[in-house]
Image (cartoon, helix red, strand yellow):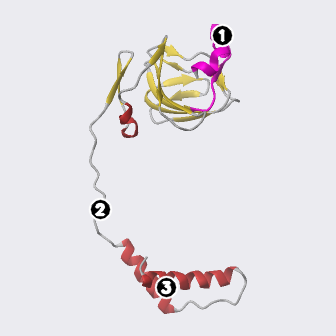
């Protein structure tokens, strides 16, 4: 950003530009190469401490269906949210101003499962804690799962899990009594 660096960058860019468009080959002098090398060395050897000061935030936990989970830093502001529960499944909707896209924290309790379903849109899931298994494998904390309308699965959690989910359409249940929920899918979505 300094004038000297800008001049060196402009000279290099002009030389490369001429070479790329098939014009006469521009001459990059040894002085320009040396100046650029010196500038790069200075940047790489800079030992100035960063101006930004970061502080560790205190751990934040949430309690869901008798289980306690530590929230990642990015979600700690949502420690006071309302949960709705149906059987072994608990969900807390997160505020997200993105049209039809919804974000939630989803908890599957001990030995719980989400009924067999597909998706009318996409669903992105980041497993925060615990584990679950579906037709595609077993997932552990940190796993990221992306599903679309072409995917069918039945998540089951032996020990319980907490997920961050983002979706743009309701689920479409494919078996048993849960299929009755499809008629009101938009409402519960």
Q: Which residues are drawn in magenta?
A: 167-188
Q: Which mark is residue 121?
A: none
In this rendering, the answer to whether 74 lies above or below 114 is below
Disc 2: CA contacts within 10 A as few (<14), some (14-19) or many (>=20): few
Q: Secondary structure at mark 1?
A: helix
Residues at discs 1 and 2 in contact (Cβ within 8 Å): no
Residues at discs 2 and 3 in contact (Cβ within 8 Å): no
8 inside magenta stretch: no
Q: Is residue 23 left or right of residue 67?
A: right
Residue with the mark numbered 2: 51
In this rendering, the answer to whether 29 lies above or below 66 is below
Q: Secondary structure at mark 2?
A: loop
Residue with the mark numbered 1: 180
| Quarter of the image with the C terminus in it | top right
- Give coordinates of residue 120: x percent, y percent: 68, 27
In this rendering, the answer to whether 49 lies above or below 20 is above
- Mark 1 or 2 closer to N-term? 2
Residue with the mark numbered 3: 7
Q: Nearer the viewer, residue 161 or 11?
A: 11
- Give coordinates of residue 77: x percent, y percent: 36, 35
């Amino acid at each position: 950003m300094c004038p000297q660096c800008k001049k060196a960058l402009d000279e290099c860019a002009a030389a490369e530009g001429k070479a790329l468009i098939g014009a006469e080959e521009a001459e990059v002098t040894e002085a320009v190469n040396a100046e650029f090398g010196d500038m790069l060395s200075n940047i790489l050897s800079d030992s100035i401490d960063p101006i930004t000061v970061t502080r560790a935030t205190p751990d934040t936990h949430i309690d869901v269906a008798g289980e306690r989970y530590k929230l990642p830093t990015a979600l700690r502001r949502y420690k006071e949210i309302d949960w709705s529960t149906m059987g072994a499944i608990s969900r807390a909707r997160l505020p997200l101003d993105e049209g039809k896209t919804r974000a939630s924290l989803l908890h599957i309790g001990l030995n719980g499962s989400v009924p067999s379903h597909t998706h009318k849109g996409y669903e992105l899931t980041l497993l925060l804690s615990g584990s679950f298994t579906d037709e595609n494998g077993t997932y552990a904390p940190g796993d990221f799962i992306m599903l679309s309308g072409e995917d069918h699965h039945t998540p089951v959690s032996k020990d319980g899990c907490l997920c961050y989910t983002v979706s743009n359409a309701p689920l479409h249940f494919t078996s048993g009594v849960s299929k009755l929920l499809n008629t009101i899918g938009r409402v519960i979505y």
